[in-house]
Image (cartoon, rainbow, N blue to C red):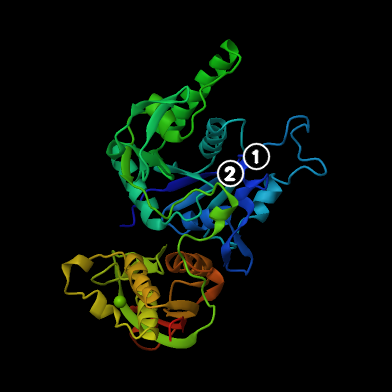
Amino acid sequence: MNDQPRIAVIITAAGASRRMGGVKKEYRALDGRHDAAGKPLTVIGASFLAFAAVPGVDAIVITYPPAPAGTGGSGYGHGAPAHGEEALRAALPAIPDRASPALITVPGGETRRESVHRALEALAARDGPAPGAVLIHDGARPWVDRDLIERVTGAALRHGAAIPLSPLSETPKEHEGGFIKTHLKRDRIGAAQTPQAFIWPDILEAHRAAHRAAQSAAQQTADGENRYTDDAEVWGIYGGAAAIVPGSPRNRKITFPEDLAAPGAERDGEGGVPRVGTGRDIHPLVAGRRFLLGGVVIPFTRGEAGHSDGDALTHAVIDALLGAAAAGDIGELFPDRDARYRDADSMELLKTAWRAVRARGFTLGNLDCVVICEAPKILPWREHIRASLALALETDAARIFVKGKTNEGFGQTGQGRAVETLATALLFAKNS
Ligand code: MG
């Protein structure tokens, strides 16, 4: 389970956001959430955090708009929109420590294809082992989640390329000259989402071929190259067929200012009767298992044994949330004698439990957690764990805290044979 392939991510944010009234949509504050440092979370920041929390992601390339023609490529004049590299860096949340994936910023090109090509060349120029897969994502889709990221990556590793496709709610028609030309069958048509995933170096080669074709087309005709709208289209011509995985209805693209509100999420911490809950868990640490805390894989010689994936922190969090809502406990909801929960992804169990708690009218005040183990150190991973839990609970990382303690050599935990976790959750009951 430790030999998962390295994943590189490209997030595109080099466009002009014309339908947002000229304000660059990727840099705008999103749905009132904050990052772990208390800074408002931006659209691009939420995308970045979603990928940074996924195990195996070791590099994230983000494109930003190229400097306008006539500025010598050096930047923006007074009064010009601040869309350059500095503005991009300011829009990203603080992920401070050495455990973070490498962040690479790249000026985009005139077209989306050119921007992605430049980002791929930046990955090719990087030292170190090559990625197994590259995910290419629209910076304006901040609600992408780990489940979709892992499904599309898995399908790409099996088939060479994969994209999320979502069903259409309205009936598509092909038209020409103001009249319907073709009645299309809705069940055979879908809308492409991102991230789109491709194996390396094949996606680099496909984009290099598209780049060469664009250069010769530009020499021959005034209007230049074919304008690709996504990477699956480039892949379709120079790579092969892309497999499909079901898209996520939450993974909407922000196009208009009113899209910035969270899809269906209630605002957290906004009054009601306070309710507190406690969770506690312990798992043996054994060789040959992943060490998982809050959905984050922490490199270590041992990991948690367990019927599920063994994520002891997530289990304590589930019990704290269920306990505060007086809605049962983890063993009742997800019995470990049930084969369905063998090797279960605990973050999916957490999302299921939190949906059930929310459905009873609760919102989250805050969540505080303790992880007790002799090794490894938790601090370098703290921001990742906070971000990962915040994504699962659809809340601010600022509402969540995690700290590590040792057991000073006492007992099983002190001898490094177990990890213990504690969680306290404060909820507010809306309906009481
Ligand atoms: Mg457990």
**Closest to the observer: 229 or 370?**
229
Crowding near the residue tagged with mark 2, few <14, some 14–19, many ≥20 C-alpha atoms within 10 Å = many
Q: Secondary structure at mark 1?
A: loop
User: What kind of residue is marked 2?
Assistant: Ala
43 up-or-down from 369: above or below = above
- Observer able to see residue 47: yes
365 up-or-down from 149: above or below = below
- Observer able to see residue 106: no
Q: Return the residue at label 1.
A: 65
Q: Position of residue 278 (x, y in %)?
A: 40, 86
Q: Position of residue 331 (x, y in %)?
A: 25, 79
Specify the quadrant of the image occupied by residue 203.
top left
Specify the quadrant of the image occupied by residue 135.
top left
254 up-or-down from 116: above or below = below
Q: Position of residue 127 (x, y in %)?
A: 53, 42
Specify the quadrant of the image occupied by residue 342.
bottom left
Of pointers 2 and 1, the one earlier in the residue sequence: 2
- Left or right: where 394 falls relative to 30: left
Q: Secondary structure at mark 2?
A: loop
Q: Return the residue at label 2.
A: 13
Which quadrant does ligand 1 occupy? Answer: bottom left
Q: Are marks 2 and 1 in contact (CB under 8 Å)?
A: yes
Q: Which image quarter holds the C terminus?
A: bottom left
Q: Which image quarter holds the N terminus?
A: bottom left
**Closest to the observer: 378 or 9?**
9
Q: Position of residue 236 (x, y in %)?
A: 38, 28
Outermost residue toward the top in this view? 220
Which residue is rendered at x = 70% and y = 49% of the image?
Answer: 86
- Left or right: where 169 falls relative to 25: left
User: What kind of residue is marked 1?
Assistant: Pro
**Closest to the observer: 254 or 61?**
254
